[in-house]
Amino acid sequence: MSATLEVRELSVCYGKVEALHRASLRVPEGSIVTVIGPNGAGKTTMLGALMGLLPYTGHAEYAGADLADASVEARVARGLCLVPERRELFGELTVEDNLLLGAFQRHTRGDRTVGADTEAVYQRFPRLQERRRQLAGTLSGGERQMLALGRALMAKPRLLLLDEPSLGLAPRFVREIFHIIADLHQTGVSILLVEQNARAALQVADHGYVIETGEIVLEGTARELAANPRVVESYLGGGASA
Amino acid sequence: MTPEIVAWLAQDGITNGAIYALLALALLLVFTVTRVIFVPQGEFIAYAALSLALMESGRVPGTIYILLAGGALAAAMEVASAVRQHALARLPRILALYVVLPAAVAGAVWWAVPRNLAQWAQVLLVLAMVVPLGPIMYRVAYQPLASASVLVLFIVSMAVHYVMMGLSLVFFGGEGLRSRPFSDGQFQLGVLNVSAQSLWVVAASLVLIAALWFLFERSIYGKALRATAVNRVGARLVGIPANLMGQLSFLLAAFIGAVSGILISPITTLYYDTGFIIGLKGFVGAILGGMVSYPLAALGALTVGLLESFASFWASAYKESIVFTLIIPVLVWLSLRSRHVEEEEQE
């Protein structure tokens, strides 16, 4: 199977502190790959580097082409989209305008099918349709996550980078979000999912990596990882639930 | 003070206030999108007004040399970055935008000056000369430092302001100029004798403000500008190009500055450095509005216009001091308030 994303020996430094050390991973076309690990392990850093927000050393190849020189805009244009942990919505704009701007590059390229995609997002998230005229800043945590996901979908991504989509959400919303992630997968989008909620992540993923203090320490199919005693003890025992 | 004088001062204040309001909106737009305090705003006023006056007197304004040189500089920087990124496909577009377009405008001005065209045609040529200086200025001076702090960007602004003012003195000279009014009429409005030019100013300001509102509310580029202003990271993540937004905000600001200059040049004699003080009053207006809200900035600027007009009646020697003193209590109030906001954000 060809890889949508191929990362080899990726390192990221904040000044002298190395937040990510020689991480290698692969997202095969059309699959869900999850990276699990504790807070501060370097998961968000890795996604930031892949999206072009942070400088890195090492090699990252997306859809067969090197990412090194690509700006954030160029990555979005090629179908690489990040839904960040902080959501980064446009709080003073309406829900509808947030979605519209998700398709900014398609608009400027003259794509006329954006309206239909807005409707598709509303079908997937009926709650957003109810709130379409509301300012994004007035939404609840779960709705904000839905809007962030919906906004990313408006760019017609080929690979979605999801950073802690379940963070801070009520259990009901967590189930809904993971349901949607599994559902997105059916439409052929590849997903790199970064999560602390290892149980839920391993349930939807095909393949997984465990990252601790900036290094990838384990990898395997989601089923293997879910059965690995070390993973069970650190990430699945007790605390995490979904 | 008789009611006639009050009405007369109010008319004067509203005319000036309308110009300050336009400038305040432009400053606010540039600041929220790029975090640049746009000190050189005033130069666009002076450049446009003086260029128009020179064209009317049958001389070729030096603005075209500034445009050609600025365009060449921007083109050189763009070509260098295209070569570095191995993106040679961008070259034709760069040359068209920064070399061919300025050359075409310069050629048109050369051709037009001896022919003494109608005033509206000269106004269009002035806009074509002055407005592109905005994006060129952004490309040359600000884009390489786009992620620097507000303070660094402010220092750049001061430098750009001095350079532009120096060029203004070189190309326009030290004498004051005035252009012909758009129409000579006078209207009797109650006790008031209103000049047609003041009506032009107020009407044009209202039309421009409405057009800006329409841009921000209805067009995707306007929404992208607002999105960049409210969340810079979010805007990058949806693929809104920060440099394009910077150039767009400078283009709008330059357009507003140039239009303001054209509107006031028949009313006021402008010198090479007059623009700065006018721009500064727009800035005071924007600060009175807290540097966040467009309607408040427009209201603040109108207040500045009225205050200035009444101050010039009661204490004309202190008219500028009174206007600029207004900033102090507002800044004190804002700084008390903004510390509170920062605390909220840290939670």
Image: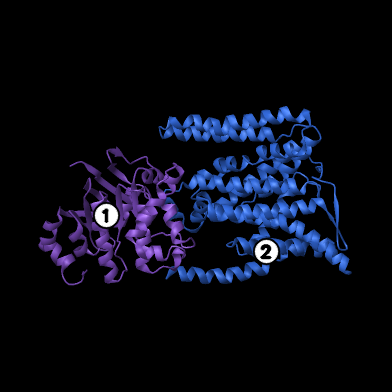
Chain colours: A purple, B blue
> Which residue occupies the foreground of this view, B30 or A169?
A169
Number of the label disc, if any, that sits on residue B46: none
Vertical comparison of A15 with A129: above or below: above
Q: Measure the C-alpha gap from mark 1 to mark 2.
A: 50 Å
Q: Position of residue A189 (x, y in %)?
A: 27, 49
Instruction: For marks 1 and 2, give the one nearer the viewer.
Output: 1
Tell me if mark 1 has few (under 14), some (14-19) or many (20+) residues whose alpha carbon lies within 10 angstroms of its own.
Answer: some
- The amino acid beneath tag 1 is Leu
- Element at label 2: helix
Check disc 1 and report the residue beneath it.
A184
- Are discs 1 and 2 both within one chain? no
Drawn side of residue B296 relative to residue A171, left or right: right
- Element at label 1: helix
Please tell me in which quadrant of the rendered image residue B17 appears.
bottom right
Report the quarter where the C terminus of chain A lies: bottom left
Report the quarter where the N terminus of chain A lies: top left
Q: Position of residue A145 (x, y in %)?
A: 35, 63
Q: Which chain hosts label 2?
A: B
Q: Position of residue B222 (x, y in %)?
A: 53, 51
- The amino acid beneath tag 2 is Gly
Tell me which residue sits at (64%, 60%) in the image: B286
Number of the label disc, if any, that sits on residue B300: 2
Tell me which residue sits at (65%, 68%) in the image: B330
Tell me if mark 2 has few (under 14), some (14-19) or many (20+) residues whose alpha carbon lies within 10 angstroms of its own.
Answer: many
Drawn side of residue B232 relative to residue B303, left or right: left
> Which residue occupies the foreground of this view, A138 or B51?
A138
